[in-house]
Amino acid sequence: MRGKSAQVGYRASEVAKVARVLPSTVRYWAGRWGGRLIRPGVADTRIAGSRKLFSAANIVEVRVAQVLLQAGIARARVANIMAIRWPPVRGADWFDPLHPLGKASALMVIREPPAAGTGRVFLSGDDEGEPPSDRSWVGAVIHAVGKEVELIRVDVPDGWQPRSPEDERRWGELKGARVIWLVNVRKIRDDIRARL
């Protein structure tokens, strides 16, 4: 697949190979019976059995969905997460591995239980390269664990509380969360780009 441009679509078998899932999984997730968990970004006639063509960003979406499902997050919740229209960061799509994010760390943050009136899932990209004294709580977790993991689960039995006013400002939505999932979208993007 090396040398394909951003405009060329990928078949389900190619997506499966790069995202490390079965081709039938990709076809199921893109079809009506799979609830259209992944929406093909290049071509989809929406006719059963027709060939669908996926974008490079779809490959990252497939991998993120697989990581979340393997972690035990309910399929309906994963479908809701994948349906969110994320705003671009510095003009780049969060999931497109062919367009660089600069120094953004690209973390998807999921909290449990979901907080009433706040975002249940959000993306962050502002901790990359900060000195340890300025790092937020999430940045400190990523730094401690390492950037080579796809998913981190943090259990906070008494509910998460901010360590500083900066944590309150940046991560206030996490207040009270007992489980926090951090999906390293940047690592997944980088792995996918290397495999294309």
Image: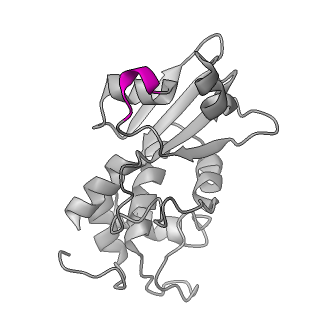
Q: Residue 104's x, y, as percent? A: 41, 49
Q: Quadrant of the C terminus?
A: bottom left
Q: Nearer the viewer, residue 55 or 172?
A: 172
* Residue 70 makes an appearance in the image: no
| Residue at (65% x, 16% y) in the render | 159
Q: Is residue 48 magenta?
A: no
67 vs 190: above or below? above
Residue range of the region highlighted in magenta in the rendering: 130-135
Compared to residue 112, the image places residue 89 above or below, namely below
Residue 166 image offset from top left, x and y in percent: 59, 26
Question: Of all residues shown, which one is farthest toward the right?
Answer: 117
The residue at 34%/51% (across/down) is 188
Q: Residue furthest top?
A: 158
**Magenta stretch holds residue 131:** yes
Quadrant of the rendered structure where residue 87 is? bottom right
58 to the left or right of 174 = left
Q: Residue at x 64, y 21 (%)?
A: 165
User: x and y percent of residue 112 in the render?
Assistant: 65, 30
